[in-house]
Image (cartoon, coloured by chain):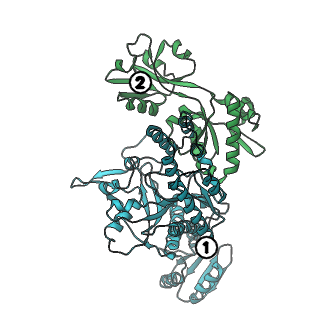
Chain colours: A green, B cyan
Amino acid sequence: MLLPGALRLLSHAGVMRLSAAELGRRLLVERSGVRVILVRPADVPAYVDHGAADLGIVGKDVLWESNGSHYELVDLRFGPCRLVLAVPEDSKLNGPNTWPPLLRVATKLPRTTAAWFEARGQAVEVVRLHGSVELAPQVGLVDGIVDLTASGRTLRENRLRIAATLGSSTARLIGNQASLKTRTEAVQAMVARLREAAKDGD
Amino acid sequence: MTDRSAPQLGGVPGFRDLLPDEAEALREAQESLLEEMRRWGYRHVVTPMVESIDVLELGLSAEQRRRLFKFSDARGEVLALVGERTIPVARLVAGKLRSAALPLRLCYAGPVLSADEGRFHQRRETYQVGAELVGAPGPVADAEVIALAARCLEAAGLRRYQVDVGHAEFFQGIMDAVRLPAAVKAGVRSALAARDFVALEDLLARTPLRSAEHELLLRFPALRGGPEILEAAGGLVRNRRSEQALSELARVRELLVAHGLGAVVGLDLGAIRDFDYYTGVIFEGYGPDLGRPVAQGGRYDQLLARFGRAAPATGFVVQLDLVWELLSSAARPPALPRIDAAIAWSGSGLDAAMRLGSTLRLFGMRAVVDTEARRDREARAWWRALGAENLVQCRGASTVAWTARRGPTRSLPPEQVAARLAGSLA
């Protein structure tokens, strides 16, 4: 959930002061020449790639899954989470040497998951699910899941443990390639402000 | 639910039918582009939709090859549907045109295919018009091709556009000069190719060396502007390749000013393109409010040698679909040509109607002669359904009735119709 962090950043950078409630209600807020829109995380790259938004704030995990033509400009550092392989607590699976010839995993991030295992020479059958991934290994659908976790609590509650970390994600600032060229000054100035604000937030 | 007995009237996903308005607009844009290229002395060539995979492999990256539609013919040869046409043109220049004197100016138009659904609108078939100048090295040729690209965008009807010019060697020179382990350099290249500046910063932050060239790499997307950035960059690079690139860019910019394009040309040292393909000046054309380039091109001096006829070359393609998208979203979309005259007939009027149709077409008007006899209200209904500007009713050999849209009906001798229509349409 990157919304609170993104709003803090916008306010800290002096771009716009907005409450989550207000943006959530209106979805599009325009003030002093800047327009802020709220879209689902997975839709952010589409808005930016098509040029409907000059800049976007989105988790790296979403960028792994999308294959867009945007520029990834700044690591904004908030909203950290890890992409992990989690297996049932009583599972024998652990490091790569314990993986079966064909590993079955459920995930909401099929592209990233398939690419990561393929890069390690592990055959994998990826089952794409849209929610409650934690349930899948408990009912025998798969050997494990690949999912995002910030604290690991949901995993523990579902009696899953982490067997491997595939990557770590934070919020990123992305930009449309044409915006950077056709409105260089305005866009670069905004990027610089957000970059500074993100640094201060550390 | 799909009804398996019904034919798939929607077509194949990723492929589009162009209905009359769009097809006509696309054709007009294509013709005006080819016409502009012809004015610059570029000869039109047509290369097939299909090429042997062996030929295409000489010029395409692994990623581009993956995106080809491939199939094998009855002899077992692997063929592909073309995804671009620079390589087929290179094949022509090195093959059937090998005795033609260089430089050669060639242009082409047609659809290209991608097995992947594109990032935008999931299109797998798009239309391109391109031009190649083969056998001419140096800034004068570079500037000619960029100026032609700009004039093509104007000819197609774009009122506002800009052209960003960069140089592939500027980046290559920096990569030569920075002292980094080979693995890090490979990482830098792939981060830049993926336009991932966060990964780039990470990589460079982990190297102890700090040089002006490091800073340049980090500021890559921001290295754009007017001629002043050439000087700014010149103060930061310390390698021959990058310096040479900067001086070539300065010269190309001067030439583009002489071409009358100073106002639309920007310099972009951070232009990121296919590093293995382009060898010199590169450029992209942008229209207003469109998130991607409508034209792109540059110098590729290594490609022809792979076909056995080493020659410098430069060229570009215009994405016709995007031109259409820009035109149709403009404040005032271009007026589409309509049918000028609907010619209805009744009684003994068919001969007169056909003669009149021929006459109007001779004058360059668009005329449709009805396929069945109709008069009065039926004729008017037919006219409205056709959406023509004028209705001409031929009831006999001697007089016709002419009705303009929102105008009265007048009786005229047939020989006066062409002149009156031309006058009212002008």
* In this picture, residue A142 sits left or right of residue A77: left
Q: Where is residue B200 in the image (x, y as percent from the top left)?
A: 54, 39
Q: Which amino acid type is shown beneath numbered disc 2?
A: Val
| Chain where mark 2 sits | A
- Which disc is residue B389 wearing? 1
Residue B326 image offset from top left, x and y in percent:
60, 59
Residue depicted at x 51% and y 66%: B142
Tell me the SS state at disc 1. loop
Give whichever of B210, A135 is nearer the camera. Answer: B210
- Density class for disc 2 (Cα within 10 Å; few <14, some 14-19, many ≥20) is many
Q: Is residue B207 visible?
A: yes
Q: Residue B206, how many percent across, how many down?
A: 54, 33
Q: What residue type is labelled 1?
A: Glu
SS at badge 2 = strand
Question: Which mark, residue B398?
Answer: none
Q: In this view, does A92 lie to the left or right of B359?
A: left
Tag of residue A105: 2
Q: How crowded is mark 1: few (under 14 residues within 10 Å), some or many (20 or more)?
A: many
CA distance separating discs 2 and 1: 65 Å
> Residue B80 at what x, y percent from top left?
33, 54
Q: Height in image: B262 above or below A157?
A: below
The residue furthest top is A90
Q: Mark 1 lies on which chain?
A: B
Front residue of A131/B266: it is B266
Image quarter in which the C terminus of chain B is found: bottom right
